[in-house]
Amino acid sequence: MRKLAKEYFGKFKKMLEDQAAKLKSRLKSEEEEPEFGDDVDSFEEEGDEAAELSNKLGLQQNSKAELEEIDHALEKIEEGKYGICEKCGKEISEDVLKANPESRLCKECKKNQNLYESVKGFFGIR
């Protein structure tokens, strides 16, 4: 039997739903297209506007990716598979879920994944 009590599922589900609502609200408020003025006086101003748009798009992309992770975690709660490492099948510890409720991996598998990514980056492997 899993150590992670069912009562925590409700707590984590609430945390995930609250975070999803915040992200959706943020994404909705950022949907408005920026107003690029026709009265641009310099290339510097145009560059600033382009940089602002680029930053905004990057933040939106990150928010959408985080929302996908949250949705995945909520699906796992509904399926009764929440808190189980997708790599090794062991239980994800409560401290990991408190820090990152949408976590897909246990602490050990995440550590191994980070090490693997570091080695890949060091050797320039994609």
Image: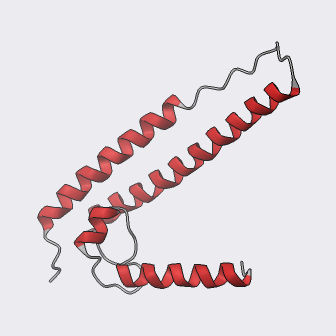
Task: Indicate left or right for 121 with 91 as reference.
Answer: right
Task: Indicate left or right for 43 with 30 as reference.
Answer: right
Taking the spot 31% from the left edge, 52% from the top edge, the residue there is 16
Confirm whether residue 82 shows in the render.
no
Quadrant where the C terminus lies?
bottom right
Query: x%, y% of residue 35?
Result: 69, 20
Taking the spot 15% from the left edge, 79% from the top edge, the residue there is 3
Q: Nearer the viewer, residue 20 or 79?
A: 20
Query: x%, y% of residue 78?
Result: 28, 61
Give the quadrant of residue 103. Answer: bottom left
Task: Indicate left or right for 18 with 37 as reference.
Answer: left
Q: Nearer the viewer, residue 88 or 124?
A: 124
In this view, 26 is above or below 5: above
Taking the spot 83% from the left edge, 29% from the top edge, the residue there is 44
In this view, 46 is above or below 92: above
| Residue at the far top in the pictured view | 39
The scheme the figure's colours follow is: secondary structure
In this view, 103 is above or below 37: below
Give the quadrant of residue 40. Answer: top right
Quadrant where the N terminus lies?
bottom left
In this view, 124 is above or below 94: below
Confirm whether residue 122 shows in the render.
yes
Give the quadrant of residue 47. Answer: top right
Taking the spot 33% from the left edge, 58% from the top edge, the residue there is 74
Label count reads 0
Task: Indicate left or right for 97 with 86 as reference.
Answer: left
Q: Nearer the viewer, residue 15 or 48?
A: 48
